[in-house]
């Protein structure tokens, strides 16, 4: 399988990780079932109360861009950024294996 992946590390402001998780859940729910989204996961590392890892798998980069660059999504992104202690650390890549 091939596809497009987005990996993001987010550090919430102290004590706001759960609130950030809920906002991320709400944001992805507002997207509905966008064409090309294969999976979206939010992960919490053990022993770190402020960090989240978000992984998105898409069929193509175009599918990602179409779904996430809407005006509504940009407004949600601004709300997410307000909850972060630092800018997110993100990377993009290609999916080479998925089971």
Image (tube, rainbow, N blue to C red):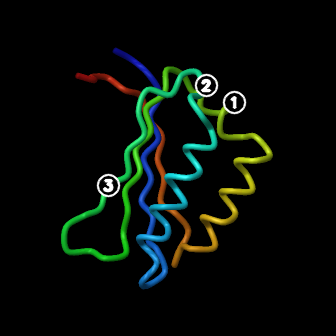
Quadrant in which residue 31 is drawn:
top right
Q: Is residue 79 left or right of residue 25?
A: right
Mark 3 falls on what kind of element? strand
Placement of the N terminus among the 4 image quadrants: top left
Disc number for residue 66: 1
Q: Is residue 55 left or right of residue 70?
A: left
The x and y percentages for residue 57 are 43, 32
Quadrant in which residue 28 is drawn:
top right
Residue 26 position (above or below residue 94): below
Mark 1 falls on what kind of element? helix
The x and y percentages for residue 92 are 48, 40
Q: Earlier in the sequence, mark 3 or mark 2?
A: 3
Residue at 38 percent of width and 52 percent of height: 42
Give the Cα distance between marks 3 and 2.
23 Å
**Pointer 2: what residue?**
63
Furthest-bottom residue in view? 14
Residue at 20 percent of width and 74 percent of height: 47
Residue 53 position (above or below residue 97): below
* Callout 2 touching callout 1 (CB < 8 Å): yes
Q: How many marks?
A: 3
Question: As rendered, which of 43 and 61 lies closer to the eye?
Answer: 43
């Amino acid at each position: 399988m091939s596809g497009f992946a987005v990996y993001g590390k987010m550090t919430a402001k102290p004590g706001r990780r759960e609130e950030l998780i809920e906002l991320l859940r709400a944001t992805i729910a507002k997207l509905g079932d966008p064409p090309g989204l294969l999976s979206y996961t939010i992960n919490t590392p053990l022993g770190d109360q402020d960090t989240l890892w978000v992984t998105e798998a898409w069929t193509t980069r175009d599918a990602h861009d179409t779904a996430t660059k809407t005006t509504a999504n940009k407004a949600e992104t601004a709300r997410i950024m307000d909850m972060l202690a630092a800018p997110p650390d993100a990377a993009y890549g290609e999916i080479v294996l998925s089971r």
